């Protein structure tokens, strides 16, 4: 059997690395089928880096965020007054298999936020 050292070994190794990187960093489509729904109470609303809106939710672990929410017209003061200590419905994106290896483990990307029947935010 021929040794895989040399050019062919490097090419195979490079292709494997590219395939692995694709699996790790491929985006998950934003839709209802890829989202999980929870109903919970909002403890507080804060600003995160990159104009993200961060929600601290009661009885949940992880960081729930609206990506670039402030750039999309959301207002922190209004959200805090409207949502604090109120029950909301949060849809967040399911994580993929490789999310467990992510350095930002425990972050949950909000795809929709509702207060009763009122949609506060939606990407769907």
Image: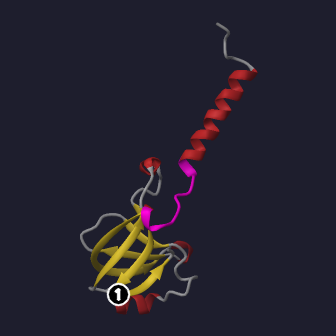
Magenta stretch encompasses residue 90: no
107 above or below 85? above
- Residue 84: x %, y % from top left: 31, 86
Give me the residue at 43% from left, 91% from top: 77
75 above or below 91? below
- Residue 103: x %, y % from top left: 47, 53
Classified by dominant secondary structure, the portion drawn in magenta counts as loop
Q: Nearer the viewer, residue 65 or 117?
A: 117
Give me the residue at 64% from left, 40% from top: 18
6 above or below 32? above
Give me the residue at 54% from left, 78% from top: 51
Q: Going by the image, does 82 lie left or right of 93?
A: left
Q: Residues within 10 Å of mark 1 (few under 14, many from 20)?
A: few
Q: Going by the image, does 96 lie left or right of 87?
A: right
Give the residue furthest to the front.
Answer: 33
- Answer yes or no: is residue 108 visible: no
- Answer yes or no: is residue 83 visible: yes
Give the residue furthest to the left.
Answer: 59
- Colouring chosen for the image of the structure: secondary structure
Magenta stretch encompasses residue 32: yes
- Residue 123: x %, y % from top left: 51, 75
Give the residue furthest to the right.
Answer: 7
Q: Which residue is mark 1?
A: 117
Give me the residue at 46% from left, 82% from top: 121
Range of residues picked out in magenta = 24-33
Image quadrant occupied by the N terminus: top right
- Quadrant of the rendered structure where residue 110 is? bottom left
Q: Nearer the viewer, residue 103 or 5?
A: 5
- Quadrant of the rendered structure where residue 70 is? bottom right
Give the residue furthest to the top.
Answer: 1
């Amino acid at each position: 059997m021929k040794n895989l050292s040399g050019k062919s070994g490097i090419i195979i190794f490079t292709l494997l690395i590219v395939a692995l990187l694709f699996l790790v960093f491929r985006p998950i489509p934003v839709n209802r089928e890829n989202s999980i729904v929870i109903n919970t109470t909002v403890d507080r609303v804060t600003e995160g880096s990159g104009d993200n809106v961060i929600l601290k939710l009661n009885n949940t672990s992880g960081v729930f965020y609206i990506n670039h929410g402030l750039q999309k017209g959301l207002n922190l003061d209004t959200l805090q007054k409207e949502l604090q200590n109120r029950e909301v419905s949060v849809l967040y994106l399911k994580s993929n298999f490789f999310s467990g290896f992510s350095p930002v483990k425990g972050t949950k990307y909000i795809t929709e936020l509702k207060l009763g029947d009122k949609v506060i935010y939606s990407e769907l």
